Image (cartoon, helix red, strand yellow):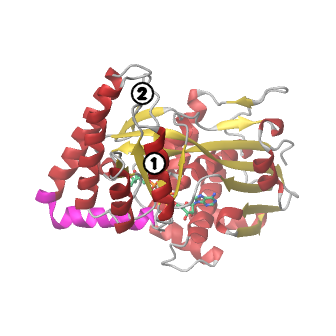
């Protein structure tokens, strides 16, 4: 049994450009958000594993003996470089009482948890007796990478519980990060969790959740963007629910149906990411307004492309119209189909215009807030470094 508990967090993300195209091998530019998912791991009673996920109303527990028996069935032909197979997920669904076609948040969360727990323990050690609570500041299913932040926290905690990674937090320290090698391992297991939740993820979200900051991601290659200027971004949640898995599958269908029409659109999105990266790299840390018109035009063009590939939504059209009426430019972020949009706030946008835009967005029933970008990736915390709200949410059992 483990002696120590663990408090870990991972950030959500905003995709500036390249969502969906990145699933098909194109580049994406993404930044970590100042909104995080937190996980608390505590030693269990020695016989059971308990999981509490208040964000998706899940409270489940299983005996270690039944999990060990299940592990043999799921991991028999297990290959960590491949997607979890339909057969493996069917066994887990039957075990957890989840319907074959279930796509509800609680079902996907439990399935990802079980898969990661069994696969990680099959590779590194016994199924541990632990109590796990996960709580998030991120809205779930809104395009801000809550699934990846969840998977990154789970990967870190389960790898630690199976003694595959260390606990670098020393007595008296507020926070600590893992080594590059340990983070690479966390990222690769978080990707498996994303595969359970998304079906066919690109890996960009778990990369941002693990490494944090700002990065370019293409076909598994992660390039950290070191000189990204301090961009001000307004985030707006239309609150229209949607599922990344369904939207990603819809885009694939459209590409298969109209390849000669859709592939050039994906190429164009790729070129937008490239252009945006060049502009960002040319901008000084505190840029003057002259750079912004290009970034704004790129937002507009990409938003049209995302509509063409079928991931727009009337609520997002409305968001773009409202901000445009105040001279501001927006696009959806993440999977689209509802969820969140981002609006660029150039330095010459007057506080009056920004406040008026926020007021009009709220009048549509949307929620909006400004937030920091470029936050750190997966992090270990001491209890005293967490604020009271987070501690309270994690300690409710
Ligand atoms: N805090 C959380 N606790 C448990 N599961 C979560 C949590 N956050 C996200 N998830 C899982 O991730 C899914 C949402 O993922 P997705 O559709 O990709 O949207 P997004 O990643 O944009 O928030 C939820 O349905 C749920 O299964
Ligand atoms: C649409 C996509 O590019 C991003 C999805 O982000 P989110 O789950 O909506 O936060 C999918 C992916 O990259 O795996
Ligand atoms: Mg997601």
Q: Position of residue 257 (x, y in %)?
A: 18, 67
Q: Could you say which quadrant of the image residue 283 lies in?
A: top left
In this rendering, would 256 be left or right of 53?
Answer: left
Q: Nearer the viewer, mark 2 or mark 1?
A: 2
- At 40% from the left edge and 37% from the top edge, which residue is drawn? 349
The answer to whether residue 352 is above or below residue 230 is: below
Query: Does 288 sit left or right of 62 as displayed?
Result: left
Quarter that holds the C terminus: bottom right
Gap in angstroms between the C-alphas marked 2 and 1? 27 Å
* Mark 1 C-beta to ligand 2 under 8 Å: no
Residue at image point 74% right, 46% down: 161
What segment is highlighted magenta in the picture?
A: 243-261
In the image, residue 88 lies at what x, y percent? 52, 67
Ligand 1 picture quarter: bottom right
> In this rendering, does residue 68 appear at all?
no
Residue beneath label 1, please? 81
Q: Residue at x 74, y 69 (%)?
A: 60
Check disc 2 and report the residue beneath it: 225
Who is closer to the viewer here, 134 or 144?
A: 144
| Residue 360 percent across, percent down from the top left | 45, 58
Q: Secondary structure at mark 2?
A: loop
Q: Quadrant of residue 375?
A: top right
For the residue pair 206 and 81, the one nearer the viewer reads as: 206
Task: Decide if residue 209 is on the left or right side of residue 335.
Answer: right
- Residue 256 covered by magenta stretch: yes
Task: Choose between 292 and 331: the one closer to the eye.
Answer: 292
């Amino acid at each position: 049994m483990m002696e120590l508990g663990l408090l870990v967090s991972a950030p959500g993300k905003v995709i500036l450009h390249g969502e969906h195209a990145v699933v098909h091998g194109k580049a994406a530019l993404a930044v970590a958000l100042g909104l995080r998912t937190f996980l608390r791991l505590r030693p269990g009673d020695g016989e059971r594993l308990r999981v509490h996920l208040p964000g998706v109303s899940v409270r489940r527990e299983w005996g270690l003996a039944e999990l060990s028996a299940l592990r043999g069935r799921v991991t028999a032909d297990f290959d960590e470089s491949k997607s979890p197979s339909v057969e493996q997920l069917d066994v887990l669904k039957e075990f957890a009482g989840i319907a074959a076609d279930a796509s509800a948040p609680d079902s996907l969360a439990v399935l990802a948890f079980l898969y990661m727990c069994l696969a990680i323990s099959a590779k590194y050690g016994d199924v541990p007796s632990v109590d796990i609570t996960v709580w998030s500041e991120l809205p779930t299913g809104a395009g801000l990478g809550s699934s990846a932040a969840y998977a990154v926290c789970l990967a870190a905690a389960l790898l630690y519980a199976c003694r595959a990674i260390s606990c670098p937090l020393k007595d008296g320290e507020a926070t600590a990060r893992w080594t590059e090698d340990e983070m690479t391992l966390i990222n690769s297991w978080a990707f498996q969790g994303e595969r359970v939740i998304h079906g066919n993820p690109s890996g960009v979200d778990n990369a941002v959740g693990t490494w944090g900051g700002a990065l370019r991601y293409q076909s598994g290659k992660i390039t950290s963007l070191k000189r990204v200027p301090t961009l001000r971004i307004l985030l707006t949640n239309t609150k229209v629910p949607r599922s990344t898995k369904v939207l990603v599958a819809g885009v694939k269908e459209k590409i298969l149906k109209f390849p000669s029409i859709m592939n050039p659109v994906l190429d164009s999105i790729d070129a937008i990411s490239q252009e945006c990266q060049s502009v960002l790299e040319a901008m000084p840390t505190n840029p003057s307004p002259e750079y912004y018109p290009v970034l704004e035009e790129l937002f507009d063009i990409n938003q049209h492309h995302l509509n063409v590939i079928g991931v727009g939504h009337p609520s997002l059209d409305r968001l773009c119209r409202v901000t445009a009426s105040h001279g501001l430019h927006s696009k959806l972020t993440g999977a689209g189909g509802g969820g969140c949009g981002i609006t660029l706030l150039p330095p010459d946008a007057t506080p009056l215009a920004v406040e008026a835009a926020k007021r009009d967005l709220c009048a549509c029933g949307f929620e909006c807030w400004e937030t920091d970008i470029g936050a750190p990736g997966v992090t270990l915390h001491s209890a005293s470094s967490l604020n009271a709200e987070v501690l309270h949410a994690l300690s409710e059992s």
